[in-house]
Image (cartoon, coloured by chain):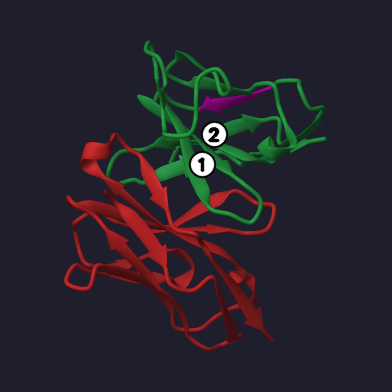
Amino acid sequence: AQSVTQLDSHVSVSEGTPVLLRCNYSSSYSPSLFWYVQHPNKGLQLLLKYTSAATLVKGINGFEAEFKKSETSFHLTKPSAHMSDAAEYFCVVSEDNQGGKLIFGQGTELSVKP
Amino acid sequence: SAVISQKPSRDICQRGTSLTIQCQVDSQVTMMFWYRQQPGQSLTLIATANQGSEATYESGFVIDKFPISRPNLTFSTLTVSNMSPEDSSIYLCSVERGRDRGYTFGSGTRLTVV
C-alpha cells in the first residue's frame, strides 16, 4: 500500500535562506509524486510533479525536488525563501494501478521570518 | 490545465440538513475525485466519480452520507447528507489532466455545520 510521510509538521526559515521540506513515500509500484501548496483560504496549487522522467524536477516559483528511489524520498527545496512562500505544503503520491487516487501527506506549514 | 468551477465557496448549515456541492470542469474528463479536508488536517479521498457508473467510495465513506452524481463528462455533485458538526470541513473536487500533467483542484467549499 502506498503512503506518504512528511517529516516536519512545521518549518520556520528566515527570508533569503534555503528551504527544505522533507517527504518520504512508500509505494509498491512506480509512483507519481507531487508537491502542492495551499495558501491560507486559497485552493491547492501544483508546484511540481515527478512521473518517472528526470529525477530532479523543477517547479514553479523556484522550487525543485529530487526523486531518490534508494531513499524513497522526494524532498522539496528552494535556494532562497521569500515571504510569499509562507503556506502549507503537501507531498502527494499516486500509483498507476490505483485509478488516479492521490494519497496526501499530513502537510508541512512553512513560516518565513523577515 | 483544466479550470474547475466549484460552488458554493462556503456555507453555514444547520445540523440535520443536506448541502449539495457542484463542480464544473471546462473540458471533458473521465474521472472526477472528491476530497475532504478536516480542520487543520490533510486531504482524504472520499470517492471517485466516473460518468455513467456509480461512484467508488473509500473506506469510511458511504453513499448514503455522501451521494455523488456524475451526469456527464464535465460536471459532478457531492451531497453531504444529514449533516452534523463533525462534517464541518473543506470539500474539494479534482480532476486528472493526464499522467504527466498532474491534477487540478477546485477552490473548495468551506462547510460549517452548526
Q: Which mark is residue B105?
A: 1
Q: Residue at x 17, y 72 (%)?
A: A70
Up-down: is A57 above or below B24?
A: below
Please provide the residue range marked out in magenta: B19-25
Judging depth in this view, the residue of A83 and B31 nearest the camera is B31
Q: Is residue B90 left or right of residue B4?
A: right
Q: Secondary structure at mark 2?
A: strand
Mark 1 neighbour density, 10 Å: few (under 14) some (14–19) many (20 or more): many
Q: Residue at x 22, y 42 (%)?
A: A96
Q: Is residue B72 visible?
A: yes
The amino acid beneath tag 1 is Phe
Up-down: is B15 above or below A97?
A: above
Residue A49 locus on image (x, y percent): 34, 57
Residue B41 locus on image (x, y percent): 58, 54
Q: Which mark is residue A40?
A: none
The quadrant in which the C terminus of chain A is found is: bottom right
> Residue B84 occupies which quadrant of the picture?
top right
Q: Is residue A97 magenta?
A: no
> Residue A86 occupies which quadrant of the picture?
bottom right
The amino acid beneath tag 2 is Ile
Q: Is residue B110 visible?
A: no
Q: Residue at x 55, y 25 (%)?
A: B24
Judging depth in this view, the residue of B83 and A18 nearest the camera is B83
Q: Are marks 1 and 2 in contact (CB under 8 Å)?
A: yes
> According to the colouring, which chain is green?
B
Task: Name the residue carrying label 2.
Answer: B4
For mark 2, name the chain: B
The hue in which chain A appears in the rendered picture of the protein:
red
